[in-house]
Image (cartoon, rainbow, N blue to C red):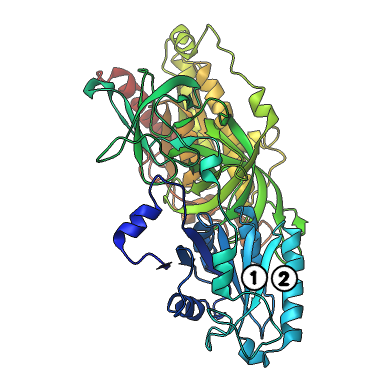
């Protein structure tokens, strides 16, 4: 819920978000579910005494499951009102919210100790609660804390001083909002504009449209298009109805560049004197928001500014205990966990540390399969190893290696339950390929666990890493011009899609070795189902760990209905059809 005070006319709101310096105060309120936020905001916004400044209040739900909403609201705020029920004191959710506020760069907090009427206006209760909270906030580098005892129900110390708490001589809540110096200074920061749209120069000068995240820009200013670093000069600043002589944070503008250089949505136009960094590996703070656990090495989509790029959490450095601020070891993250981690991207992006520029330092993580937002993060710094790496270009490439072998390199990814017949089928297919003079290799999941993946178990996080490693090896073998047969359960769709994205278009062939669970369990060639049913094996696919069958496999092999020879012939026939099919 968003409330506005001091903005009585529609044009006032427009003025507040114009390209003039910002003068509105963006405030977030947070606290527990029953701490009285709505009552307090109602009292604040309906008070008889007007405030000196306009402000926009984002009221976010207090329950733990709505931490995502709280983080989203805080990302645009300059000041936070943290509510505490005086009869309850500092609660775990209070600590969680304050930790998130700290990570999101909010250093100004008004602590409203509410429901003082329920504790008989006790100064002792107030002093104790204020002391505990201030000590906790100080550990998070939140040092600008103004503590105010209030009663939202009676209005005491909200807009008017309280007669019931004559011992308190500080400001009312409204006075604190009016007087707290929280100027964001975004105009004085280095210029950054993430590009949303680009107009082709065929229709006139190239125009790049976006919302300025920080800094000011004027016609004639030299700029860089990042992450490529191509230079140009701003020739015009255009809005819907006029040209501007100066633009800053506010509504979208279009910058016309003097040079015909490549610019794409997702690029960042930046100042030449203080350009953003460029990297594909970072250390960052992460707030996990989804009920589905984070799995390191799983591929997610990272959205930063207007750019989107594939991402993986490569290392969970620690998880933060919001009660004690203790750093704890973790292999995964559950909903509302806060962590510090390393992240790797598919390509380099333009960025700034979040503590310096929010617009190019904050990001969202998105589930590739469901498109749900699963986490928000704040870049701390680029990992040094990323800036020291360059890719060496080799003369002999994949097409040359494939041509030498007279074949089209590809991956046949056989997925299915244990006992479905993946390894048996892969072996039979490779025999036929060998007889035909083709160059192939089988990457068998069980065999690889004797070497490449011997350090991995069978929990979901290890299964993700198992598939990632195998996919990386398969990609190298395809680059060598081979036909690669991968035989691995690979139970999760996300990881199979990750493997597909690692290959070029048409190189990844998903083969569903389809055998019902009862058939696999009846076969039980290694006795694993019997052990799983007896509780001797944990996290066994199909029993106590899920298997997600392919939704649109390229080949379906019904191993319970056809012989191994027939299945191998089916795969060979598919490969022949790819070679013989006419060009589209």
**Residue 575 sits in quarter:** top left
Is residue 554 in sight in this rendering? Answer: no
Identify which residue is drawn at 41% across, 38% down.
247
The residue mark sitting in front, 2 or 1, is 2
Pointer 2 residue:
133
Quarter of the image for the C terminus: give it.
top left
SS of the residue under disc 2: helix
**x%, y% of residue 482?**
50, 18
Identify which residue is drawn at 39% across, 28% down.
219
**x%, y% of residue 58?**
47, 65
Is residue 536 shown left or right of residue 289?
right
**Residue 408 sits in quarter:** top left
Above or below 490: residue 447? above
Above or below 116: residue 250? above
Q: Nearer the viewer, residue 574 or 55?
A: 55
Residue contact at pointers 2 and 1, CB within 8 angstroms = yes
Identify which residue is drawn at 76% across, 55% down.
327
Above or below 19: residue 89? below
Pointer 1 residue:
94
């Amino acid at each position: 819920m968003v409330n506005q005070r001091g903005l009585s006319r529609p044009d006032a709101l427009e003025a507040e978000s114009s390209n003039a310096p910002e003068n509105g105060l963006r405030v977030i309120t947070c606290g527990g579910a029953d701490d009285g936020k709505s009552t307090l905001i109602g009292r604040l916004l309906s008070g008889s005494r007007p405030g000196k400044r306009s402000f926009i209040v984002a009221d976010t739900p207090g329950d733990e499951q709505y931490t995502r909403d709280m983080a989203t609201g805080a990302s645009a705020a300059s000041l936070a009102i943290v509510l505490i029920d005086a009869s309850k004191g500092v609660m775990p959710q209070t600590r969680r919210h304050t930790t998130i506020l700290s990570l999101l760069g909010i250093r100004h907090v008004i602590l409203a100790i509410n429901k003082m009427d329920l504790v008989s206006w006790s100064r002792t209760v107030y002093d104790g609660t204020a002391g505990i909270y201030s000590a906790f906030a100080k550990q998070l580098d939140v040092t600008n804390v103004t503590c105010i005892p209030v009663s939202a129900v009676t209005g005491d110390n909200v807009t008017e001083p309280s007669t019931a708490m004559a011992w308190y001589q500080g400001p009312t809540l409204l006075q604190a909002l009016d007087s707290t110096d929280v100027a964001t200074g975004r105009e004085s920061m280095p210029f950054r504009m993430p590009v949303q749209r680009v107009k082709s120069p065929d229709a006139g000068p190239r125009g790049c449209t976006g919302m300025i995240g920080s800094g000011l820009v004027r016609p004639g200013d030299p700029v860089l298009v990042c992450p490529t670093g191509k230079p140009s000069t701003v020739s015009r600043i255009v809005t819907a109805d006029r040209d501007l002589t100066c633009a800053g944070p506010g509504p979208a503008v279009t910058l016309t560049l003097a040079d015909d250089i490549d610019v794409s949505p997702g690029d960042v136009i930046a100042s030449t004197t203080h350009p953003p960094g460029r990297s594909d590996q970072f250390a960052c703070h992460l707030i996990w928001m989804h009920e589905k656990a984070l799995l390191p090495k799983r591929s997610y989509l990272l959205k930063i500014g207007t750019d989107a790029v594939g991402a993986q959490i490569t290392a969970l450095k620690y998880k933060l205990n919001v009660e004690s601020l203790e750093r704890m070891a973790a292999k995964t993250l559950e909903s509302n966990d806060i962590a510090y981690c390393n992240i790797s991207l598919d390509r380099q992006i333009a960025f700034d540390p979040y503590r310096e520029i929010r617009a190019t330092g904050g990001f969202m993580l998105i589930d590739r399969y469901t498109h749900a937002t699963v986490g928000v993060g704040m870049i701390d710094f680029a990992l040094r190893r990323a800036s020291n790496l360059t890719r060496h270009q080799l003369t002999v490439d994949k097409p040359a290696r494939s041509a030498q072998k007279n074949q089209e390199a590809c991956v046949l990814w056989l997925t299915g339950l244990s006992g479905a017949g993946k390894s048996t089928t892969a072996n039979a297919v490779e025999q036929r390929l060998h007889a035909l003079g083709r160059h192939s290799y089988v990457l068998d999941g069980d065999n690889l666990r004797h070497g490449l993946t011997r350090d991995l178990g069978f929990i979901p996080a290890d299964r993700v890493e198992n598939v990632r490693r195998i996919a990386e090896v398969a990609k190298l073998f395809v680059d060598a011009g081979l036909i690669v047969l991968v035989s691995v359960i690979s139970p999760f769709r996300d990881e199979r899609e990750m493997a597909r994205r690692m290959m070029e278009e048409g190189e990844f062939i998903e083969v569903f070795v389809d055998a019902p669970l009862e058939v696999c369990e009846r076969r039980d060639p290694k006795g694993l189902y019997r052990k799983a049913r007896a509780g001797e094996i944990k996290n066994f696919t199909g029993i106590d760990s899920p298997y997600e069958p392919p939704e649109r496999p390229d080949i379906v092999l019904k191993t319970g209905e056809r012989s191994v020879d027939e299945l191998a012939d089916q795969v060979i026939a598919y490969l022949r059809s790819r070679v013989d099919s006419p060009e589209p």
